[in-house]
Image (cartoon, rainbow, N blue to C red):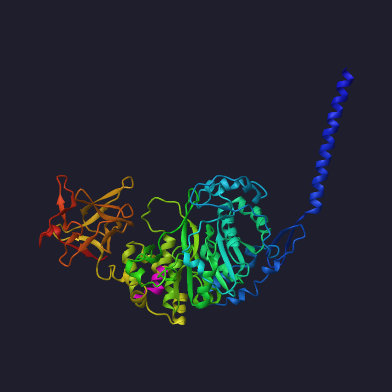
Amino acid sequence: MLLRKRCRSLLCQLQVLVLLLALVLMLVMVAILDPEVQSEDSSGYVYQHHGTGQRWAGSLLLEQSEDANQYKVELLSPLSSLRDEELIAIGIPGQSRSFEKIRRNIYKIVKHSKRKNDANIVTQSWHTEQARNIHEFKKNGSQRIPIHRTVPEGRHPLCHQQIYNENLPTTSVIICFHNEAWSTLLRTVHSILDNSPKRMLKEIILVDDLSYQGHLKSALSEYISRIGGVKLIRSNKRLGVIGGRMLGAARATGEVLVFMDPHCECHPGWLEPLLSRIVNNKNRIVSPILDVIDWKMYDYYHSPDLRQGVFDWKLDLYWVTLTESEEKVRQSPIIPLRTPVIPGSVIVVDRHYFQNIGAFDSGMEDSGVENIELSIRVWLCGGSVEIVPCSRVGHLSQIPSTSNITENETILKNKIRIAEVWMDSYKDVFYQSIGMEHVSNLSKKTDVTEREQLRLRLGCKGFQWFLENIYPEINASVSVQGLYGLLFNTEADSCVQVIYNSRMSYHMVELSDCGSKLNQLFVYHDKKIYSNLTESLCFDLMYEQIVLTNCSFKEASTWDFTEAGQLIHIPTGKCVETVSIETGKTFLFLSLCKNNQGNQTWKMIPV
């Protein structure tokens, strides 16, 4: 009996040993048949591809001496200063798009459940995407959505009747990213590949701006190596969005450049209308209608109205819908719309025109207002700016953040460059609107000599022309006419100030000694009174008392600032007056209007 048990034990051990040997043999065979190849040349590029006999397309990226020389504009000097050894360029095999796709998910605006087939799109589980990246996008929501999906149709029916020239120019789509979520980035790439004609899409250039998330390292390199038509360029130092886009532009070979954020989804037929406008006039930059991708659930929502991009005197971008009169003037709902500014999320421009007009301002740091600068420059220097209604691209909405009343210094520096180069005497209006004590120090440190020389070389118009012909609404807004600054009461010899309370949905206003503090600066524009703390806060009523509320909560109260100094609430016809209470504080209330009454007499004091 004992002998029999020993035999059984030896037999089990032998079986385990045989299985281990078989496993080792299999691993050896895989290593021999599918070795990972790396080659490095003297230029400092590292090329990676993986076996299986695929054709290597490294020559696409060995063009630093050829294509980079096409950009001999002085403005691209920061790009030439980026040494080749500071870059890692990862090429791709061939031009075919043979990567295995999952079945597309045609959907409406509903919640998505995870599909079993989704796992087929990747070769391993990317748990690193669970980590929190700097954008703080909700990855769990993105992971539930397939890498390939078809967005719901949102184009006007007339768009389907448009016939475009088959000989439209080739395109390079440039996407700069830093620590982007895995699924969000790849969904952007595949939406471009899936919805762009092959003959028009020359390449997608991914510029990795020194990401440190694990899923964007070798995993991304391996994934990209299996997709035709995509290049991956890695920078070994932070460039910022502007620098990354400039690097991609210098390496691009397409006739037209598309600068796109790494969290977009392209609508079917998005590219042809944009290229058609560029073919008709290369001296223009265009942008699609931007739909909204919800940052929580990644549902896709169509933008309901055609809107123009505009900016205020603080050079902040916002959107305005067309008035009824403007809509009536338009001969067709699908005619491209001239706009003062296009968003920076998707910018389409002829490559040589982009070069000749001065590219992006390389003196700007990171991203923020570069689209405003480019739009103003194009208008003033003989070009035009349009939004094309038959082209739609979804853009991931940003996560709501708490109000920050302090201007980001990097963005402020970028705005100062715009004001100093392009706004002429109106730059004083910008400085008044910002209302920050240290802005003068920043402006003194700003060297815009190179951009001023560019303006002279291009023979650009003055900013007054822009105000008269492109965006006259902003010229009527204030500041120049003294309707920006301190809201001063003549009888009390005091100024209105905001009692800001982040825990409340409204904010009280009171009278106080005059200064130049942010909470005492106001803008009267378009019959509304905005706080300089943030343009989302407007004068409103709460039981006849004046308070500040969020302008987006409801239709903001409208006001008439008369020449006599009365501030009239238009819906009621009553006037704003000061009322002192027992505590010694003075607040603002509505009352019947009375002529020549000091506590109802106001004026804006410019600062």
Is residue 225 on the magenta stretch? Answer: no
- Left or right of 367 on screen, residue 511: left
- Left or right of 56 on screen, residue 287: left
Location of residue 337 (image quadrant): bottom left
Q: Is residue 447 visible?
A: no
Magenta highlight range: 416-424
Q: Nearer the viewer, residue 29 or 235?
A: 29
Q: Nearer the viewer, residue 450 or 22?
A: 22
Q: Is 125 above or below relative to 325? A: above
Q: Which x, y percent locates residue 258?
A: 54, 67
* Residue at the image point whose x is 38% and y is 62% from the top: 318
Q: Which x, y percent locates residue 195?
A: 58, 62
Of the 4 image quadrants, the one containing the C terminus is bottom left
Is residue 419 on the magenta stretch? Answer: yes
Q: Nearer the viewer, residue 434 or 467?
A: 467
Location of residue 442 (image quadrant): bottom left
Q: Which x, y percent locates residue 588?
A: 19, 53
- Left or right of 469 on screen, residue 129: right
Residue at the top extreme of this rendering? 1
Q: Is residue 541 visible?
A: yes
Q: Main secondary structure of the magenta part?
A: helix
Location of residue 375 (image quadrant): bottom left
Q: Which x, y percent locates residue 26?
A: 81, 45
Q: Nearer the viewer, residue 538 or 243?
A: 538
* Residue at the image point whose x is 78% and y is 54% from the top: 34
